[in-house]
Image (tube, helix red, strand yellow):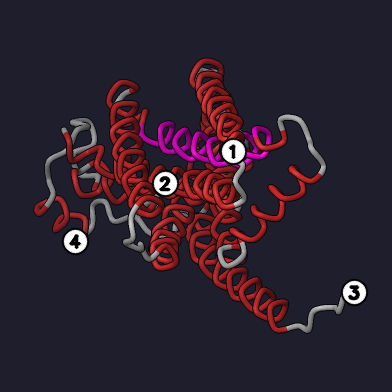
Amino acid sequence: MAFEILGSVIFSFVTSLREVLEAALIIGIIASYLTIIDRKDLFRDILYGVFAAVIFSLGMAWVFLTFFTDLAEYQKLFEGIAMFLAAVVLSWMIVWMTRQSKKIRSDIQEKVDKIITNQEKAGIAFLVFISVAREGAELVLFLYASYIGSVGEVGAVTAFSAISLGFLTGLLLAAIMAIVLFTTTRRLDIKKFFQVTSVILIIFAAGLLAHGIHEIYEFLEISGSSLINNVIWIEVWNINNTVLGDVLQFLFGWSYDPLNPARFEKSVVGGIIVGLFGWNDNPALIEVLAYGLYYVFIAIAIKRFTNFSEMREKAPQPITD
């Protein structure tokens, strides 16, 4: 049974590792800077901010699991929208980190200086809360999108267990990496880490987009909408009942759905590919186009913002008295 949920575990592990490490880096930068300027008395505010952000994130997760997992005939529509939103936020996070990674430390230190200079009450706690809560909210959205994408196939308990396993593993590894980074003389290559995880998350985001479109189609089909007759929903290919499908069935024939034993996406390997890449045995035209165009869009966005950041760095700074 472990193989069927491996895709969900990997997705939740990578996203959790990335988001938690980002939050830990922000906390570490603030704590390190307060130490340098001899304001350790504000460490308590950091703890307040982290605690509030964790409570906020857990509350958000509870709301999603309590109120948005049984919307009757609109469930498929909501799942599709949630996957779209997760793909958009995931893409924005990747592009933003590409642009801001070089100056995130200076930006945070500048904000801390402003808070201390203006003697803003609870300013440090609020800065930490906003920074960590943003990462927490993003993570909840990503994990929920993965959860609803797999709950229909493996059940709520198994899907939740897979997401939890990936999250806890990512949380533990992120904590270890943060401790190594801030308490020892060893230096982790954070830039390369974010580059590698960005590539993985881009693949995840493309899969979420395609899977979201598939959920929208199922909603239209269930609701009896005439929109499914549109040309964009034409089936591009269907590997089932083909030579390729027969070969895949022979190689990966075990299925956790006895009613559909010939479907590759129901096999062990197929289920993993579905979880990681949003694979569909018989995708519609709009799914294929959206999946391919997403990679073009994200490449252009990263290239554009990278060039913009380099131009800003090379631009002459204004002279101040």
Earlier sequence position, callout 4 versus callout 2? 2
Does the magenta-highlighted stretch encompass residue 202?
no
Query: Magenta-highlighted stretch: main secondary structure?
Result: helix
Q: Which label sits in the foreground, 4 or 2?
A: 2
Q: Position of residue 48 (x, y in %)?
A: 58, 26
Instruction: Give the residue displayed 64% in from the left and 33% down from the top.
Output: 125
Q: Circle 4: is it few (<14), some (14-19), or many (20+) Cα within 10 Å?
A: few
Identity, as a three-letter code, of the amino acid under mark 1: Ile
Which image quarter holds the C terminus? bottom right
Name the element at disc 4: helix
Which residue is labeled 4 in the image? 243
Q: Which label sits in the foreground, 4 or 1?
A: 1
Earlier sequence position, callout 4 versus callout 1? 1
Which disc is residue 81 wearing? 1
Work out how far the residue at label 1 is from the one at label 3, CA to CA, in angstroms.
52 Å
Q: Circle 3: is it few (<14), some (14-19), or many (20+) Cα within 10 Å?
A: few
Work out how far the residue at label 1 is from the one at label 2, CA to CA, in angstroms.
19 Å
| Viewer-nearest residue: 112 or 244 | 112
Where 161 falls versus 124 (above or below)? above
Q: Circle 1: is it few (<14), some (14-19), or many (20+) Cα within 10 Å?
A: some
* Furthest-left residue in this view: 250
Earlier sequence position, callout 3 versus callout 2? 2
Earlier sequence position, callout 1 versus callout 3? 1
Which residue is labeled 3 in the image? 321
Work out how far the residue at label 4 is from the one at label 1, CA to CA, in angstroms.
35 Å
Identity, as a three-letter code, of the amino acid under mark 4: Val
Q: Which label sits in the foreground, 1 or 3?
A: 3
Which residue is labeled 2 in the image? 15
